[in-house]
Image: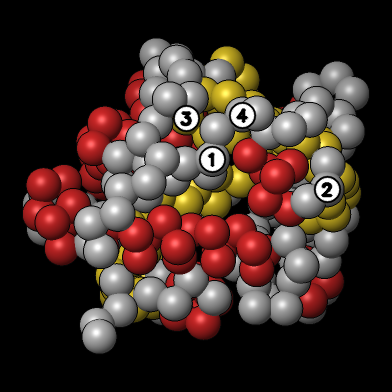
């Protein structure tokens, strides 16, 4: 029997600073194939090449990946500044309407890092351009030096709301995660429930209240060693079940707050 298909949102990338590609990290594909049990398919996030309607018919679910470019602040009504960094307007043009359509239809998605931020913006929320510049916040950015293992090492705790979907999924209110992001949620969007935070108050886990499908999204990078990490594995397994249920016509609602 064919595996359900998960569209992995690709990022614009230049090879040797000159050859344009749509790239998807290998660890994203590995997590989807090995833990979620689905067929990974990298999506070129460019509205000239794909449409939201076509993507929703071809794919059963979507992985909203991390990426170096940030959501453009015009998408949440703020002016561009140097602190906002690089952008990918083509990805914005695909993912933001895609997220809204998925929420409405009940089709599953899992947001990671930039994808987490995209979910908030798509639902009308805003972002801080640089978390580390806020009073009392830690530096959540990826360490500039070191090995991949050192950059993706567990660095801080995330605490979940009592009885919320993340608490129930992990069986624990506190987990250790990595952290590799500069921006973060400023104002939560409509129906966005911040279900997990770091000790400094940074939003780390969210879902869309009342959505009929899987909308769990996280600020950290669970795709790293997903098959072995005790936090990543249940998250990708739960997403895989939601995708398989959608593909089979069993459109079960996401876990709701107890």
The residue carrying pointer 1 sits among few (fewer than 14), some (14 to 19) or many (20 or more) residues within 10 Å by Cα, namely: some
Circle 3 sits in a helix, a strand or a loop, which is it?
strand
Task: Kindly indicate whether the residue at mark 4 contacts the one at mark 3 (C-beta within 8 angstroms).
Answer: no
Residue highlighted by disc 4? 257
Q: Determine the residue positioned at 30% across, 40% down.
A: 106
Location of the C terminus (image quadrant) = top right
Q: Position of residue 149 (x, y in %)?
A: 79, 76
Residue topped by disc 1: 255
Q: Quadrant of residue 10?
A: bottom left
**Residue 141 seen in the current view:** no
For discs 3 and 1, the disc positioned in front in the rendered view: 1
Residue 200 visible in the current orientation: yes
Give whichever of discs 3 and 2 has the lower sequence position: 2
Residue denoted by label 3 = 208
Q: Is residue 243 left or right of residue 67?
A: left
Foreground of the two, 206 or 16: 206
- Mark-to-mark CA distance, 1 and 4: 7 Å
Q: Are marks 2 and 1 in contact (CB under 8 Å)?
A: no
Looking at the rendering, which quadrant does residue 243 occupy? bottom left
Residue displayed at 61% across by 20% down: 186
Q: Quadrant of the N terminus?
A: bottom left
């Amino acid at each position: 029997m064919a595996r359900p298909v998960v569209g992995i949102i690709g990022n614009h990338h230049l090879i040797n600073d000159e050859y344009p590609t749509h790239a998807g990290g290998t660890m994203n594909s590995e997590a989807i194939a090995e833990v979620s049990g689905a067929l990974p398919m990298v999506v070129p996030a460019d509205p000239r090449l794909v449409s939201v309607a076509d993507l929703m018919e071809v794919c059963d679910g979507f992985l909203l990946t991390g990426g170096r470019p940030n959501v453009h602040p015009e998408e949440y009504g703020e002016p561009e500044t140097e602190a906002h960094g690089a952008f990918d307007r083509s990805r914005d043009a695909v993912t933001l309407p895609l997220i809204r359509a998925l929420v409405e239809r009940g089709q599953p998605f899992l947001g990671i890092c930039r994808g987490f931020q995209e979910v908030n913006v798509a639902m009308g929320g805003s972002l801080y351009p640089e978390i580390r510049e806020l009073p009392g916040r830690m530096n959540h950015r990826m360490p500039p030096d070191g090995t991949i293992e050192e950059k993706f090492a567990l660095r801080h705790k995330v605490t979940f709301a009592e009885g919320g979907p993340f608490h129930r999924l992990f069986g624990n209110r506190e987990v250790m995660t990595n952290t590799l992001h500069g921006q973060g949620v400023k104002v939560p969007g409509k129906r966005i429930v911040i279900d997990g935070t770091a000790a400094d108050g940074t939003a780390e886990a969210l879902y869309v209240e009342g959505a009929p499908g899987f909308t769990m999204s996280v600020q950290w990078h669970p795709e790293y060693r997903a098959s072995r990490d005790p936090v990543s594995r249940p998250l990708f397994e739960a997403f895989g079940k939601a995708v398989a249920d959608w593909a089979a016509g069993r459109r079960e609602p996401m876990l709701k707050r107890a």
